Amino acid sequence: MKCVDAVVARLPKALSAGACFAVVAPAGPARLDVEKAREWFVRRGYTCRFYPSVQQADGYLAGSDAQRVQDLHDAFADPGIDAILSMRGGYGSMRMLDQLDFDLIRGHPKPLIGYSDITALHTTLQRHTGLITFHGAMLNADLLGGKAQPTESSLLAQLSGQVGAGAEIAHPSQWPLTTVTAGVGSGVLRGGNLSMLGATMSTLGEVDLTGSILFIEDVNEPLYRVDRLLTQLRLAGKLDGVKGVLVGDFAGISVAAMTPLLRAIFGPLNIPVLAGWRSGHCDPNLCLPLGAQVQLDSTAKRLVLEQGLFAA
């Protein structure tokens, strides 16, 4: 295994009709209706392949560490697979980080999709392979769980290359955004689940936020624990080079309740902060391309993609 910081990976190809999704379970187990799932892909013009851990359980894990690592490696290596979709979150992704073959993954670039516990894979693969990964809907709870549009359409639009350089990453107007601090900033979109960002500190998955637009979301965390997690990032010097902050959903905490904390943590940095973005453990759950260059305009309440996500 070779670990390389600040690497640039080849871009994958955008998905086209007939593309094949690998369904993997890097974290927790779940009961998955395989036929219902297969029909979901077929109705949208895709095919799918279910890897062994999807139908396994080892306590709170979807199969052994070795099996889940093997599934991920096999999905990246297989030329017949076009994208890799996580079945669910839970816990378990961190346990695989020191077993990942970064050379293999870098050599077979493919979109990896998931959120919550999958944040550990997002931060690790971006740091050691340079891949753009997608903080977006997972199969069980989101795509098969009946979450509202544009949960599905935002994911498939990005994966199919419909959102290119210069395009705004749309946010539905019925869910208002809040400008916490006005301004404009550009950087690489990084982050994900806030608890996982804290848990992966001093590991292979520790996030590098230098020159980034930081995205954060979480669930089942009261306000004082969100304060503790953000303070951890501040005291670790992780916020020093951040160029802007996009705040996703924090289930159970309103934007109004979070605003004083956000101003206390990020106000001294004089960077744009935009809150209320519908990504995370919420309905709808919008897709975000982590590792991609973006511009955040918190005054105009816009997020614009500054690069293409796929090879020409």
Image (cartoon, rainbow, N blue to C red):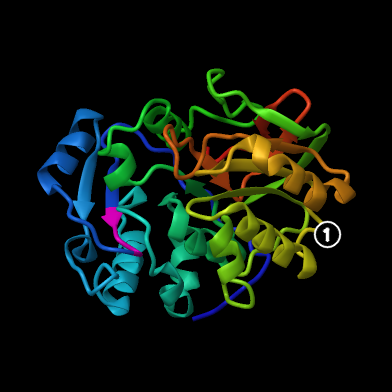
Q: Which residue: 46% across, 55% down?
A: 116
Secondary element at image label 1: loop
Furthest-left residue in view? 35
Q: Please say whether residue 24 is one of the residues in the magenta stretch.
A: yes
In the rendered image, residue 231, in percent from the top left (x then y), is placed at 73, 62
* Observer able to see residue 109: no
Amino acid tagged 1 = Asp
Q: Which residue: 49% across, 47% down?
A: 135
Q: Which residue: 75% across, 23% down?
A: 300
> What secondary structure is the stretch in magenta mostly built from?
loop
Q: Please say whether residue 228 is one of the residues in the magenta stretch.
A: no
Residue 164 picture quarter: top right
| Nearer-the-camera pick, 243 or 278 | 278
> For this view, does 125 lie left or right of residue 74?
right
Residue 284 picture quarter: top left
Residue picked out by circle 1 = 240
Residue 197 lies, with reference to residue 87, above or below; the image says below
Residue 143 lies, with reference to residue 177, above or below; the image says below
